[in-house]
Amino acid sequence: MAKYSFEFKLKIVNKYRKGSLGYTLLAKKYGLPSRTPVKKWIQMYQHFGEDGLKRKNRKKSNLFI
């Protein structure tokens, strides 16, 4: 799955919030494979604000233990 930057996600969410385009048209305009990521980002933004769009840091396990 492709990774998108926080700034890119926020840009799309803000375009959606302005009300000019829906999920599908935003996805097409910005070259996303489907409307699903757009919908997910908007839902995360609505529930958690900008923090919902940020990547979560995961600790990598030490493979040499």
Image (spheres, helix red, strand yellow):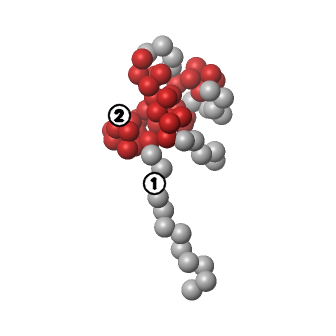
Q: Which residue is mark 1?
A: 56
Q: How many marks?
A: 2
The amino acid on which the numbered mark 2 sits, given as a three-letter code, is Gln
Q: Which mark is residue 46?
A: 2
Label 2 crowding class (10 Å Cα cut-off): few <14, some 14-19, many 20+?
A: few
Q: Where residue 55 sits: x, y (%)? A: 48, 50
Secondary structure under badge 1? Answer: loop
Residues at badges 1 and 2 in contact (C-beta under 8 Å)? Answer: no
Secondary structure under badge 2? Answer: helix
Q: Quadrant of the C terminus?
A: bottom right
User: Going 49% across and 40% down the picture, which residue do you hit?
Assistant: 6
Tell me the distance, in whole angstroms, between the alpha carbons under discs 1 and 2.
Answer: 17 Å
Image height of 54 relative to 46, above or below: below
Q: Where residue 44 sits: x, y (%)? A: 40, 39
Residue 39 visible within the image: no
Q: Where residue 57 sits: x, y (%)? A: 47, 58
The amino acid on which the numbered mark 1 sits, given as a three-letter code, is Lys
User: Going 50% across and 20% down the picture, which residue do you hit?
Assistant: 22
The image quadrant of residue 14 is top left
Image height of 46 relative to 55, above or below: above
Residue 5 visible within the image: yes
Which callout, 1 or 2, points to the residue nearer the camera?
1
Closer to the camera in the image, 51 or 32: 51
Q: Which mark is residue 38?
A: none
User: Going 66% across and 29% down the picture, which residue do you hit?
Assistant: 31
The image quadrant of residue 3 is top right
User: Going 46% across and 22% down the picture, which residue do you hit?
Assistant: 16
Residue 26 horizontal side relative to residue 52, left or right: right
Residue 27 horizontal side relative to residue 48, left or right: right
Label 1 crowding class (10 Å Cα cut-off): few <14, some 14-19, many 20+?
A: few
The image quadrant of residue 25 is top right
